[in-house]
Amino acid sequence: MNKRIQELERQCWTNREDGLFPGQAHFDADKFALLIVKECVDICESGTSTQTTSSGAAQMIRQHFGIEE
């Protein structure tokens, strides 16, 4: 897994303060998805007009997350 994805995943683990098992580790999937979407938006907004076409933005996002075609 790409190091950036691992960093985002680590940010999404918290200890529960509610429910049956307070203090139990919990992965917040909604937060994880939001962080990934924010990274993608940042990539698109930071590129030049050629890079932010659909294929240019897609390529930048793949490179950022280390995803091979």
Image (spheres, helix red, strand yellow):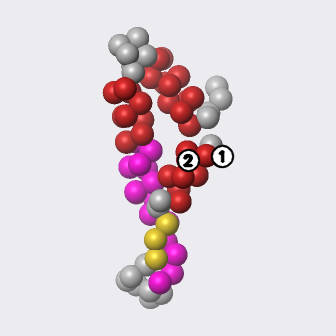
Reply above or below: 55 against 2: above
Dot 1, crowdedness within 10 Å: few (<14), some or many (≥20)? few
Q: Main secondary structure of the magenta part?
A: helix
Instruction: Give me the residue at 41% from left, 30% from top.
Output: 43
Reply above or below: 60 against 36: above
**Quadrant showing the C terminus:** top right
Judging from the image, what secondary structure is the residue with disc 1 in?
Answer: loop
Which residue is identified by label 2? 5
Disc 2 vs disc 1: Cβ atoms closer than 8 Å? yes
Which label is found at residue 45?
A: none
Q: Which of these two is toward me, 63 or 54?
A: 63
Instruction: Give me the residue at 56% from left, 37% from top.
Output: 65
Which residue is identified by label 1? 1
Judging from the image, what secondary structure is the residue with disc 2 in?
Answer: helix
In magenta stretch: residue 9: no
Whether residue 48 appears in this view of the structure is yes
Q: Report how far apart the C-alphas of labels 2 and 1 lie in the structure.
A: 7 Å
